[in-house]
Amino acid sequence: MSIVKLKARAKISLVTTAAREIGIAYANDLAIHQNSDLSGIIGSMNAQETAINVMLNQQTTFTVQDTKDGVRDSITRDLAKAITGYMAIPVEPIRSAAIELDAVFAPFGVSMVDESYGVESGKINGFLAKATTPAMKEKTKLLPGIDLLLSSLAEAQADFETSYVAYEEAMADKKEVSSASALKPALVETINGKLVTLLRALVMLNETQYGHFATVVGQIIDRANSASKS
């Protein structure tokens, strides 16, 4: 029985899927669990697959948070432009209302979008608290579109905060490895250099006991290799 090796160029999703399926197949084949060498390799493979998935989840968390930050940054910039535009209109009470709103906005400033996530959140919340008082609402209702921008900023900030805890946890757990792709070669080597090599030897010694598992592993690797061609 010949088991082909997993292609090193296979996408990371194909590699982790293959590893997960092999792990499940091993767990379901109780007859081969007494082999300590095989169980050790499977344990290493499972740990590597888990580590890659953790890294992928971290990267997803970072991307989601960055996207949400971009939304609130865009609204903040639009708000700053709108205030500046209204202050340039020589019509009362529009101009005076805009000047009062700018007096509230200026201490925080559009530069808050360049601050760290935490600092920016504090400034946005501080600005919104002052810009939405009953007295300020009397002013902002004189400026078409401003109330909508303020409510949009509040919604964007709230949405940002819903996933911020997960982001902080991901940052705290972040490993020195720069990306999940950097972990892939070790997993491929565990499958090819250790698991496949051992299974080839075990099948030669006792095909009755190890043949079924070896066949399943071969099928899993074949699927991954075939998918990597497309």
Image (spheres, rainbow, N blue to C red):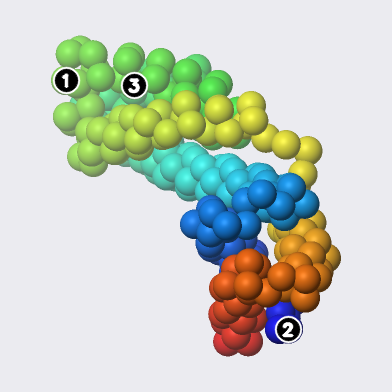
Of pointers 3 and 1, the one earlier in the residue sequence: 3
Category of crowding for the residue at label 2, using alpha-carbon neighbours closer than 10 angstroms: few (below 14), some (14–19), many (at least 20): few
Q: Which residue is mark 1?
A: 138
Q: Which residue is mark 2?
A: 2
Instruction: Tell me the tag on residue 35.
Output: none
105 to 39, vertically: above or below: above
Category of crowding for the residue at label 1, using alpha-carbon neighbours closer than 10 angstroms: few (below 14), some (14–19), many (at least 20): few
Q: Which residue is mark 3?
A: 128
Of pointers 3 and 2, the one earlier in the residue sequence: 2
Category of crowding for the residue at label 3, using alpha-carbon neighbours closer than 10 angstroms: few (below 14), some (14–19), many (at least 20): some
Three-letter amino acid code at the position of disc 1? Glu
Instruction: Residue 206 in the image: state x and y as whole percent.
Output: 71, 70
> Marks 3 and 1, how far apart in space?
15 Å
Asked whether residue 137 is in view, the answer is: yes
Quarter that holds the C terminus: bottom right
Question: Answer yes or no: do the residues labelled 2 and 1 have beta carbons within 8 Å?
Answer: no
Instruction: Residue 189 in the image: state x and y as whole percent.
Output: 80, 62
For image coordinates 37% across by 31% down, the residue present is 162
Asked whether residue 7 is in view, the answer is: no
> Which label sits in the foreground, 2 or 1?
2
Camera-nearest residue between 24 and 178: 24
Per the image, label 3 sits on a secondary structure element best described as helix
> Which label sits in the foreground, 3 or 1?
3
For image coordinates 58% across by 49% down, the residue present is 53
Three-letter amino acid code at the position of disc 2? Ser
Instruction: Residue 179 in the image: state x and y as whole percent.
Output: 71, 51
Camera-nearest residue between 111 and 144: 111
Q: Which image quadrant is residue 105 in?
A: top left
